[in-house]
Amino acid sequence: MSALVQPAVLRLREQIQRLEGVPLRARTVLPFGVEAIDSRLPGGGLALGALHEVAGGGNAAINGAAAALFAARIAARTKGKILWCITRQDLFAPALAQVGLHADRVIYVDACDEKTVLACFEEGVRHGGLGAVVAEVARLSMTSSRRLSLAAEASGSIAIAVRRWRRQTEAADFGQPTASATRWRVSTLPSSPLPVPGVGRARWLLELIRCRAGESADFVMDACDVQGRLALPADVADRSATTQHGRRSA
């Protein structure tokens, strides 16, 4: 879908909402500050008042950690407290601080099971006084995602579902349709090369595999720095074709 088509789709959605009697809210977005990404998102950034999904690419724990850091980076750019709902006590606060989300901003909810996580997730989104609400879930049904999406739209909060699973069979659920505005997959790549021996800045492959009123795209990025900023790798930025775009099925 081209950039010229996206406004037409948005106008059509607004017309449908008016016909359905759904109150319209002014759209606000949270830009990434990276033109290559923002230009691919409707409105020039990640929609606030919406549900977004993030998962690690493959089964490696390091990709799951990268997905959590990517979600933390998004949350860090909002204002106010962040509610983070978990069932496993393996979230490493110093790592979140390294991407700009400091511990004094985060309220943790340690739930006993996924059903409770979803209930806390929805309640946090409905609150409306939080900068962002993040929840780690394995399964996300269309019904649950629809409820979360409507709650986010009503409150204006951004909701981020970090998809984590213990078993491979649960991973298949990530391909099922949901009401999320965007769906991302994060994979680690070899770090940026250095001119001297050492370990360079971490590098990610960001896959935007679903985008409502937009199209899918892939981005090779230098991972977040201590200010939470993503950046195009220097060797990629030097080339005119800095991103690889492709259609994918959500």
Image: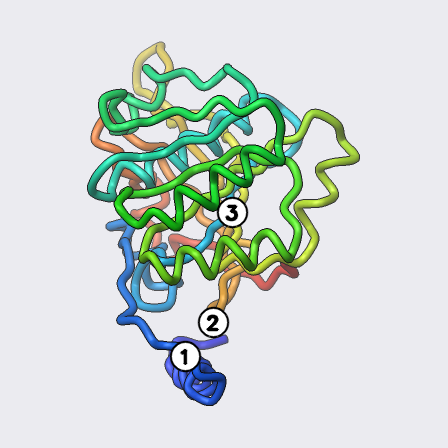
Q: Is residue 226 above or below residue 45?
A: above
> Residue at 50% across / 53% down in the picture?
148
Helix, strand or loop at mark 2 = loop
Find residue 234 and report its horizontal and vertical position in percent.
Answer: 30, 39
Helix, strand or loop at mark 3 = strand
Badge 2 crowding class, 10 Å Cα cut-off, few under 14, some 14 to 19, many 20 or more, is some
> Residue at 24% across / 41% down in the picture?
77
> Residue at 48% across / 37% down in the picture?
120
Q: Are marks 1 and 3 in contact (CB under 8 Å)?
A: no
The amino acid type of the residue labelled 1 equals: Leu
The amino acid type of the residue labelled 3 equals: Glu
Q: Earlier in the sequence, mark 2 or mark 1?
A: 1
Badge 3 crowding class, 10 Å Cα cut-off, few under 14, some 14 to 19, many 20 or more, is many
Badge 1 crowding class, 10 Å Cα cut-off, few under 14, some 14 to 19, many 20 or more, is some
The amino acid type of the residue labelled 2 equals: Ala
Residue 179 is marked as none
Could you say which quadrant of the image residue 227 lies in?
A: top left
Q: Is residue 179 left or right of residue 69?
A: right
Residue 213 is marked as 2
In the picture of the structure, the residue carrying the numbered disc 3 is 53
Residues under labels 1 and 3: Cα distance? 21 Å
Could you say which quadrant of the image residue 240 lies in?
A: bottom left
Residues under labels 2 and 1: Cα distance? 7 Å
Q: Which residue is nearer to you in this view: 151 or 198? A: 151
Q: Which residue is nearer to you in this view: 50 or 98? A: 50
Q: Earlier in the sequence, mark 1 or mark 3?
A: 1
Q: Which residue is nearer to you in this view: 204 or 241? A: 204
Q: Are marks 2 and 3 in contact (CB under 8 Å)?
A: no
Residues under labels 2 and 3: Cα distance? 16 Å
In the picture of the structure, the residue carrying the numbered disc 1 is 10
